[in-house]
Image: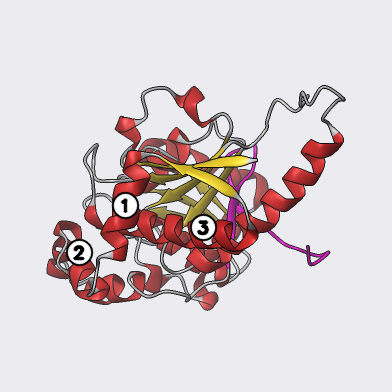
Amino acid sequence: MTLHLNAILSPQLLRDSALLRNSITVVIDVFRATTTIAVALENGALEIVPVGTIKDAEAKAKELRGRLGEKSVLLCGERGGIKPDGFDLGNSPLEYTREVIQDKILVLTTTNGTQALQAASAAPLVLAASFANMQAVVMFIMRYLVLHEARAMQLTDANNNTKDEQRIESICAFCAGSEGDFSYEDTLCAGALLEALATEFADGGYAYTTSDTAHAARNLYRNEAQLAQTLASTRHAEYLASLGFGRDVEFASTFGTSRMIPLRRTDGSLIHWHNPLNL
Ligand code: MLT
């Protein structure tokens, strides 16, 4: 099996969603949506429902509250970095403490992150990652590939044709970017993810190819000597700091604060992948 490492640097650069059909797709929005998602699941949120618009988020929260009870659901998100009127929580990962969100369903709408999660829906497996949970996501992908390969072997006939239409051929780091543009922080995070996967592939004897965008993201990350400073100097980080969210930037620039593996279910909600069999 030869896998292809790819990076899409903003959802608007995805020419055709069918290109994700055989790809494990990892959505990245460092500042702040995918960091917040990892923290929310870490602190006991039951699930996160990513929604595109404020209106749809309000409607979804209302519907879920009608079915599950007023206190079971929180309406969360931002526009321009700020909590919209009538919302319970904004998009600061530091707001998502266990006391506030444990056992709740979170309806989340953000400017770029939740849009990217929706844009990735054609992929057979969609994960959400940031520096916070990168290691956990990388280890999950490696385990998933081993199990996937075992299954593909079962489904391969004597002529070496696999019957599995959802065969995994690539891993795609899918950056939320910034309203259609490249964002430095998401690209650095994509580079870190792809670099970690490439190291695991080399150690595990997997062959792989690399797209030019993946190559560029890996090089950007590898040549970055002062990651935290560079992240803090990005356009969106400076904007967040100007709103008083400087601690969010620091938190989101730190590796390993979450062990969560946020996985998109077929209904679009994100849940943590539990591993009861310790596979
Ligand atoms: C987004 O989705 O664009 C964000 O996560 C923005 C933010 O909350 O800073």
Q: Is residue 138 above or below residue 54?
A: below
Residue that label 2 marks: 237
The disc at residue 197 is: 3
Measured as percent of width and height from the top left, residue 196 is found at 48, 62
Please name the amino acid that badge 1 sits on.
Ala
Question: Which of the pair 98/163 is nearer the observer?
Answer: 163
Please name the amino acid that badge 2 sits on.
Ala
Quarter holding the C terminus? bottom right
Residue at image position (23%, 73%) is 225
Mark earlier in primary sequence (2, 1): 1
Measured as percent of width and height from the top left, residue 129 is found at 47, 57
Residue extent of the magenta highlight: 260-279
Is any atom of residue 83 visible in this view?
no
Mark earlier in primary sequence (1, 3): 3
Please state if 21 lies on the left or on the right of 228 as rendered: right
Magenta-drawn stretch, dominant element (helix, strand or loop): loop
Q: Is residue 100 magenta?
A: no
Please state if 76 lies on the left or on the right of 203 as rendered: left
Measured as percent of width and height from the top left, residue 49 is found at 53, 47
Q: Is residue 246 above or below residue 105?
A: below
Under circle 2, the secondary element is helix
Under circle 1, the secondary element is helix
Measured as percent of width and height from the top left, residue 7 is found at 39, 43
Under circle 3, the secondary element is helix
Residue at image position (29%, 56%) is 219
- Numbered marks: total: 3
Residue that label 1 marks: 217
Measured in 3D between alpha carbons, the distance from the residue under mark 1 to the one under mark 3, in whole angstroms, is 13 Å
| Neighbours of disc 1 within 10 Å: few (<14), some (14-19), many (20+) | many
The disc at residue 141 is: none
Measured in 3D between alpha carbons, the distance from the residue under mark 2 to the one under mark 1, in whole angstroms, is 19 Å
Look at discs 2 and 3 and give the one toward the viewer: 3
